[in-house]
Amino acid sequence: MPDTAVDWDLYDAVLFDLDGVVTPTADVHKHAWEAMFTAFLTARSAADGVAYAPYTEQDYFDFVDGKPRYDGVRDFLASRGITLPEGEPDDPPTAQTVCGLGNRKNDAFNQILASEGVTAYPGSVALLQQLHQRGKPMAVVSSSRNAPAVLAAAGLTDYFGLIMHGGLAEELGLPGKPAPDTFTHAAKELGATNARSVVLEDAINGVAAGHAGAFGLVIGVDRGAGVEALTAAGADVVVQDLDELVADEPATDEGAGA
């Protein structure tokens, strides 16, 4: 097994992506994207008389994963040679616009979250607890506007000094991943430099953002993207689960809110 031991004393902040790193909500996002795009392509094929290639799981990794919602819609549609009006963020989910499709996907995600809830990965919780015990500042850096609701549903909000989500990034005028700006802003808010911060990401775009920002350590979490792809994007270390990063020391704290 490769050595995944991390000397956390070398770093002043730890920056976590959320979906697929802390919580398994990446699967919920996958299903919501698949349902939305499959229905859209079926209707569009009938209307245009064109047999568009169906949406696949690989499309999620190639065009959607780790990006702001509307960027994902736009990039996927471009892969099929489809152009839609941009629309506005408050477009109804029935609108045939980039924003309308993004909002349709978000409705599906929220319905699943409300009905099923979310439980964090046990290995991720173990790492959060250990870093919290060490007094290590942590932030979530997620392209999803749903990040605060997901963290609240999982009972993890109190671990993080900052939740950098897609809505906040837009308010601040920060470009989304693969640009490093949201990670850089989070590190600065926690009083750290990029070089003294760790990025944990499962998405190719997120790993690329960490690499582009010259962060001290970029850890790829392989939830399906693949070790080779994460390494090629700039991951210094790739793990299957965050429990591989938990040091062998006794736990003394039940959690951030205990």
Image (cartoon, rainbow, N blue to C red):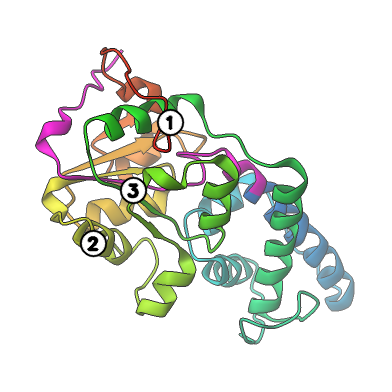
| Residue at image coords 73%, 61% | 37
Decide which of tag 2 and tag 3 comes sooner along the chain.
2
The answer to which quarter of the image holds residue 77 is bottom right
Of marks 2 and 1, the one in the foreground: 2
Q: What element carries label 1?
A: helix
Q: What residue type is labelled 2?
A: Glu
The disc, 2 or 1, on the residue closer to the chain's N-terminal end is: 1
Q: Where is residue 92 in the image (x, y as percent from the top left)?
A: 75, 80
Image x and y of residue 103, in percent: 68, 71
- The magenta region covers 1-28
Residue 27, magenta (yes or no): yes
Instruction: Examine the rendered structure and indicate whether residue 54 appears above or below residue 25.
Output: below
Q: In this view, does 59 lie to the left or right of 54?
A: left
Q: Mark 1 points at which residue?
A: 124
In space, the residues marked 2 and 1 are separated at their CA atoms by 22 Å
Crowding near the residue tagged with mark 1, few <14, some 14–19, many ≥20 C-alpha atoms within 10 Å: many
Magenta stretch, main secondary structure, is loop
Name the residue tied to disc 2: 189
Q: Residues within 10 Å of mark 3 (few under 14, many from 20)?
A: many
| Residue at the extreme right | 46
- Look at label 3 and name its amino acid: Val
Of marks 1 and 3, the one in the foreground:
1
Look at the image and tell me in which quarter the N terminus lies: top left
Residue 174 or residue 164, whichever sits in front: 164
The residue sitting at 36% across, 33% down in the picture is 128
> On screen, 122 above or below 23?
above
Mark closer to the observer (2, 3): 2
The residue pinned by badge 3 equals: 207
Figure check: 158 above or below 106: above
Q: What residue type is labelled 1?
A: Ser
CA separation, marks 2 and 3?
A: 20 Å
